[in-house]
Amino acid sequence: MSYVRHLVYSRWLFHHSKSLSVNSSVCRHGRQTRLFSTTRSCRTVMPAWVIDKYGSSDVLRFTKNASFPIIDYPNEVIVKVFAAGLNPLDVSMRGGYGAATMSARRDPLNIKQSGSEFPLILGRDVSGVIMECGLDVKYFRERDEVNEANSRGEKCVHVCSVTASLYIQVWAAIPPWKQGSLAEFVVLSANEVSHKPKSLSHIEAAAIPYVATTAWSALVNTGGLSKDNCAKKRVLILGGSGGVGTFAIQMLKAWGAHVTVTCSQNAERFVRDLGADHAVDYTAGPVEEPLSALEKFDLILDNIGGETERWALTLLKPWSGAKYVTLVTPFLQNTDRLGIADGMMKTAATMGTKALKHLAKGVHYRWGFFAPSGPALDEIREMVDAGQIRAVVEETFSFSQVPQAFEKVEKGHARGKTVVQISKGGEDL
């Protein structure tokens, strides 16, 4: 009976809200009814760039009717996107890379039909503002602006038409199994989101989260480095002028490490300006030869893969805990080609074989993976606002130029990030 009363009340609210200056919608979480402010018409769609199948750049499609994100869990938040960063992963995902693993992550019980991920929204970096919070989200309610809104009987921040001071500016790296940031709104878990650095614009902020959390996962979680043990450590970054490399250089230098990178001659000045102590030109010949003449390293971060594994581990200090961490792994390729079960078995066998082989030589072989982390972004925000890390934006595109932005990323040899401005006016919030 209580459910019937609740349903009748919800419909009454919906039909009578047109007479109000701002509509009220009802969110049901268990037996609680929660009102939050929306625009005059209840939003069910939004503009976004989507793909309906995997392929080349011609599969990108702009629509004004993409499904508006919904909070399904009490720890989620809806973010209005002001800027979105593109990564090489977005180009790969557009072509179907990792599709098997991502589908399994979205639908672990394999209930949905094949292709249920479409229309798929790409984009792994986001900078924007919190628009709606789940019931369990406390971290983004602690500021005075939100408490002031709540004191007026408003349970969450307005979706539109509210004072700019009420918005909480955030940034995040979006997991690849979730809908991305090339849209007006995106839904994320609160533990994936962090307050945006005050010193950065939304465009600058959108250049950092994905590469930052990837580098953090590889260097801190896998490599065991931290601001407390990094001083005077010798670190080699293979592929230092890309997104992950440019961030890793700055973070490691802020922690006191000695950083050597490989890059083209054209990028040498660029990486040195970021703080690299030594740069080796890989276009001048076999790069392993000049690297072998240097003092051995405590850690190697490999953004290149391929043949580098053949010689890179010989550059580490043996029997001293030195680690080789590569971000180029066969995991997603194996699961795409062999399926989840067989792909994971082959991956585990490959990893185990290589780890044991190099452990016998006194060095550690590891794989690094992206890991979304709001707490990591909290620490990175402090480093950014302290002037220790700066955003490296190579080119900015408008929302209507997403296909051109993908073409730019697809060409490779980047000197920083490609960013898409989704909405204007965010810098005033």
Image (tube, rainbow, N blue to C red):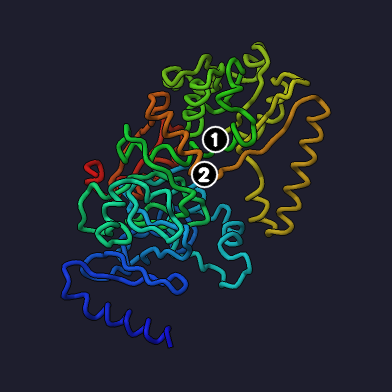
Disc assigned to residue 373: 2
Say few, some or many: other residues with alpha carbon within 10 Å of mark 2 (under 14 / 14 to 19 / 20 or more): many
Residue at position x 19%, y 75% in the image: 18
Disc assigned to residue 142: none
310 vs 378, left or right, is right
Name the secondary structure under disc 2. Answer: loop
x, y percent for residue 90: 47, 48
Closer to the camera in the image, 302 or 223: 223
The reply to whether residue 25 is in sight is: yes
Q: How far apart are marks 1 and 2 (CA)?
A: 9 Å
Closer to the camera in the image, 206 or 49: 206
Furthest residue to the right? 360
Give the amino acid at mark 2.
Answer: Ser
Residue at position x 54%, y 35% in the image: 216
Is mark 1 in CB contact (under 8 Å) with mark 2? yes
x, y percent for residue 5: 37, 85
Residue 121 vs 283, above or below: the answer is below
Give the amino acid at mark 1.
Answer: Trp
28 vs 229, left or right, is left
Residue at position x 46%, y 33% in the image: 380
x, y percent for residue 161: 20, 58
Residue at position x 49%, y 26% in the image: 251
Disc assigned to residue 216: 1
The reply to whether residue 415 is in sight is: no
Residue 214 vs 386, above or below: the answer is below
Name the secondary structure under disc 1. Answer: helix
Closer to the camera in the image, 118 or 76: 76
